[in-house]
Amino acid sequence: THAPPPSHTHTQSHTVTNTHTHTQMAHAYTVPAAGDISKAGDGKSLLEHIVADVKALLAAKNCGPILIRLSWHDAGVFSNGSLKGGCPNAVMRFTDSGEGTFEANAGLTDVAIGLLKPIADKYVTAGVISNADLWALAANVAIEFMGGPHVVTRFGRPDAKDSGESVESQVGRLPDGDKGVSHLREVFAPKGFDDRDIVALSGGHTVGGCKQQRSGFDGLWTEAPLVFDNSYFTDLLEKTYRPETVEATGCPQHRSDKGTIMLISDLALLEDAAFKSVVEEYAADQSRFFADFVSAWTRLQENGVGDLLRDELAPPK
């Protein structure tokens, strides 16, 4: 979910109940019939229609965190260090091999893509938007829907034609939740991210949680898993976390008296002076966190495809 991030190879819960803002809704979600979407006649642009459908999905399914994670893992494989290549291309749609089979992407290929399928069937099939652009847009709509900052989405990410357009492995490209400071820098520096970016992206863990059947870790990071704010950072500084092992999987993590969790990679942000100073800054100033998150997150979503992107929604080339 880093996004979110959401940002480690652990997974974020796709539906979580939150008593603070949105509540779990029991009714089924259906996308309005497509008809001729080029002639909606209601004065809304196609982009506004897509955004409205994503918001309806979010309201019905409380699935913001896993949509953020989908975009993060699609784009986050990019690297320009000893490992090269990778870009947001929605190659996880293919599960015969490649990224669609990575352990890090458990829950994305079925749940996340499945949640977006009615919207993809309506707009991607019609040639309005690519899957990769839809995944980026849906994540950004989710961030703002849950109370986070507005993120501008640019368009033009081409979709992979088959699993052969995957990177070779998640290793060294997506961070592991059971590793610390040096690992975070080793993974994120080749993507163009500095210490401040790493902390900002880690703040995506203010929403969602981990499911042991997907990642091996288990629990929610914050007490309001559907609210995108700076509580991840205030929790890091204010709560006491005790080490534990997830019984069913043997994965190490830490749990607070409130029942929320932090992973080794989360607590690493307190172990390094450069990281910790940024944690303290974001805990004290949510607006600074939001601004830095948007900067880092936008670069993450555009890594490897920046020269192709444009401001307007147009049929993918």
Image (tube, rainbow, N blue to C red):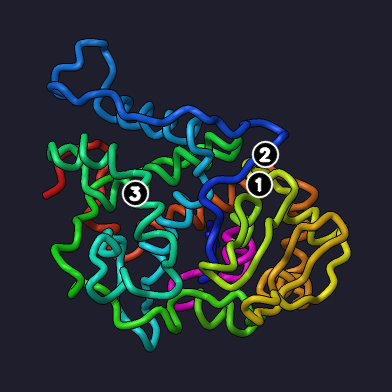
Rendering quarter of residue 172: bottom left
The residue that disc 3 covers is 114
- What numbered label is drawn on residue 5? none
Q: From this view, report whether residue 35 is shown above or below residue 217.
A: above
Name the residue rendered at 66%, 74% in the picture. Answer: 265
Name the residue rendered at 43%, 83% in the picture. Answer: 171
Q: Position of residue 211 (x, y in %)?
A: 58, 62
Left/right of residue 85 with respect to residue 11 in the rendered view = left
**Which of the pair 88/101 is nearer the observer?**
101
Q: CA distance from mark 2 to mark 1?
A: 6 Å
Is label 2 in a helix, a strand or a loop? Answer: loop
The residue that disc 2 covers is 18
- Mark 3 or 1: in front is 3
Residue 205 included in the magenta stretch of the image: no
Residue 190 included in the magenta stretch of the image: yes
The residue that disc 1 covers is 225
Q: Position of residue 125 (x, y in %)?
A: 15, 41
**Which of the pair 188/102 is nearer the observer?**
102
